[in-house]
Amino acid sequence: MQMDVISIRKKLKKKLDEQRYEHTLGVAFTAMSLAMKYDVDLHKAELAGLLHDCAKCMPDEVKLHKCEKYNIEISDTERKNPSLLHSKLGAYLAEHKYGVEDPEIFNAILYHTTGRADMTMLEKIIFVADYIEPRRNKASNLSEVRKLAFENIDQTVCKIMKDTLSYLEKKNAVIDNETMHAYEFYASETRKTN
Ligand SMILES: [Fe+2]
Ligand SMILES: [Fe+2]
């Protein structure tokens, strides 16, 4: 059975550290604001925002163990960097531990880190809200991206992907194929409309 928002928040407060919980609330409220702008169901945006990082704060070995227990496939990259598993595991927990029944919400959780080509509006909203919520302060161009988010969501997705890719390149980190493919998709989408 689906839990109400207040019970979900109480449970998350126990599962997440203080900073992650604050980030979670920021993503949920930002997602609802974007949902107002782009005609998406506010409740779906709130649930997806609240639950997107629900699996983030467990130790890596617990993430791996739980994925094995629930038969969630683990790629070689994820085995080397188990933090990546928090999206997949989060989508699973949203369904089985928080009683969410809506596949649109699972997908918004599943793709919140990498993004993917041709996302639904809810997926774009969570992807963007995760980057711009008010407690975020790392990226240098945040005020520009925050404004753009309420003007053109596809351009915002494209910009975030571009910045994330160049950040990962600089760090020499592994770049997920899905992210690369998604970026190429949005780069060509935004070229079409400009
Ligand atoms: Fe995340
Ligand atoms: Fe997040």
Image (cartoon, helix red, strand yellow):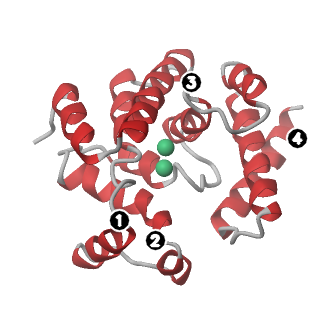
Mark in front: 3 vs 1:
1
Residue that numbered label 4 is attached to: 191
Tell me the kind of residue under disc 3.
Answer: Pro
Q: Is residue 125 left or right of residue 18?
A: right
Mark closer to the observer (3, 4): 3
Mark positioned earlier in the residue sequence (4 or 2): 2
Q: Quadrant of residue 9?
A: top left
Q: Are marks 3 and 1 in contact (CB under 8 Å)?
A: no
Residue at 54% over, 28% down:
135
**Amino acid type, label 1:** Pro
The answer to whether residue 184 is visible is: no
Residue 70 numbered tag = none
**Tag on residue 59?**
1
Residue occupying the far left of the picture: 1
Q: Which residue is located at x 19 percent, y 40 percent?
A: 11
Q: Are there few (<14), some (14-19), or many (20+) residues within 10 Å of tag 2? A: some
Query: Is the C-beta separation of discs 1 and 4 under 8 Å?
Result: no
The amino acid marked with disc number 4 is: Arg
Secondary structure under badge 1?
A: loop
- Check the image and report above or below for 101 versus 60: above
Q: Which mark is residue 82?
A: 2
In the image, 121: left or right of 108?
right
Assess disc 4: are there few (<14), some (14-19) or many (≥20) residues with their C-alpha within 10 Å of its C-alpha: few
Question: Which residue type does callout 2 highlight?
Answer: Pro
Q: Earlier in the sequence, mark 2 or mark 3?
A: 2
Along the viewing direction, whichever of 143 and 93 lies nearer the viewer:
143
Above or below, 175 relative to 135: below
